[in-house]
Amino acid sequence: MKKRISLLLPTRGRRDLVERFLRSVVAQSTCPELIEVILRVDDDDADSHGIVFDGLALKLVIGPRQTMGAYNAECLRHATGEITIAVNDDIIIRTNGWDEKVRELDASHPDGVYLGYANDLFKGPKLCTFPILSQTACSALAAPYPDIYKGAFIDVHLMDIFRRLEKRGYSRICYAADIVFEHVHYRNNPDALDATYTDRSRFGDDLTFIALAGTRRLEADRLLALVSGGTPQRRNLPEQSAVTRTGLLGIWPLCARRFLLDFDLPVGWRCYLFAWMVSRYYFSKISGVP
């Protein structure tokens, strides 16, 4: 039996983009009848309540405005597919038969522990912008999509967990360069800039990501237990709270402790995170971008 794929799609005020994305899903799928889309919309976004689409199993979940982490977590709770993909409404799928390629990626890891991602024509192999996870892996993790993330860093959070698993001897990060999910992002397409982008804080989740290093260590432990043939322990995660504000000089020792001195991470990833997070911090201060 071919596995069912669940697409987790939070959206707000972008009905046209959602419909464009759904058209590309159907047009490029081998088995559209085995794809479901969980659409999470806000209760005050009346126009999105009317989204319907023939040819796909579409679940409309309506609720109060939440963080992006909470949206994805809610979508996941409604997903019935054995394979899940967190997607955006500003995607156009370009690869014919993409769903079969996703199933092949999934089949290459019979234990279900992997982090897959397509080529988004923006970040490419550097980041799992639209993470592909099995339901098995999602169930092993305490919180694949932590509620505390307002709008960013969910992809980096997941990649960090799997980098920790890699350090433990299991390389399970799978970049599928031949599956193209074009991300029509405003930084590549200025005409795409809209209120959904401008309402979001670009650097609002940076300190949260730094704070959750211990959480990611525990999540990697759960995956390690699964790939080792054991049962992931259901220990409570540390309280999900962001790092408090730090002074301009304080960011260096903070990132050094959380990244450079985190021997649970591969050296290259440690150095990358340290340099990237410090540079983001100073850029936000110099540019004034929140």
Image (cartoon, rainbow, N blue to C red):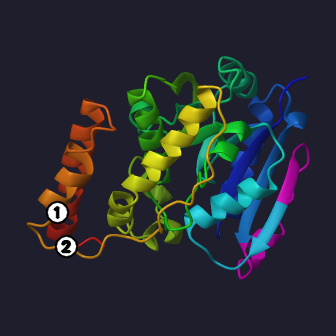
Q: How crowded is the residue under tag 2: few (<14 C-alpha within 10 Å), some, or many (20+)?
A: few
Q: Which is nearer the eye, 169 or 180? A: 169
Q: Is residue 184 visible?
A: no
Circle 1/circle 2 CB separation < 8 Å: yes
Counting from the top left corner in percent of width and height, residue 50 is at 84, 69
In the displayed orientation, state which residue is furthest to the bottom. 44
Give the side of residue 244 with respect to residue 105, left or right.
left
Tag 1 secondary structure: helix
Residue at 42% across, 28% down: 168
What residue sits right under mark 1 in the picture? 251
Residue at 43% across, 46% down: 217
Q: How crowded is the residue under tag 1: few (<14 C-alpha within 10 Å), some, or many (20+)?
A: some
Tag 2 secondary structure: loop
Give the side of residue 108 with respect to residue 270, left or right.
right
Amino acid at circle 2: Thr
Give the side of residue 269 with respect to residue 90, left or right.
left
Q: Quadrant of the N terminus?
A: top right
Counting from the top left corner in percent of width and height, residue 65 is at 64, 78
Q: Residue 187: say if magenta.
A: no
Residue at 65% across, 39% down: 137
Q: Is residue 79 visible?
A: yes
Q: Which is nearer the eye, 94 or 231? A: 231
Q: Which portion, as a residue range, is magenta?
A: 42-59
Res. 246 mark: 2
Q: Earlier in the sequence, mark 1 or mark 2?
A: 2
Q: Quadrant of the C terminus?
A: bottom left
Q: Is residue 212 above or below residue 132?
A: below
In the displayed orientation, state which residue is furthest to the left. 249
Counting from the top left corner in percent of width and height, residue 144 is at 59, 51
Q: Which is nearer the eye, 11 or 24? A: 11
Res. 264 mark: none
Amino acid at circle 1: Ile
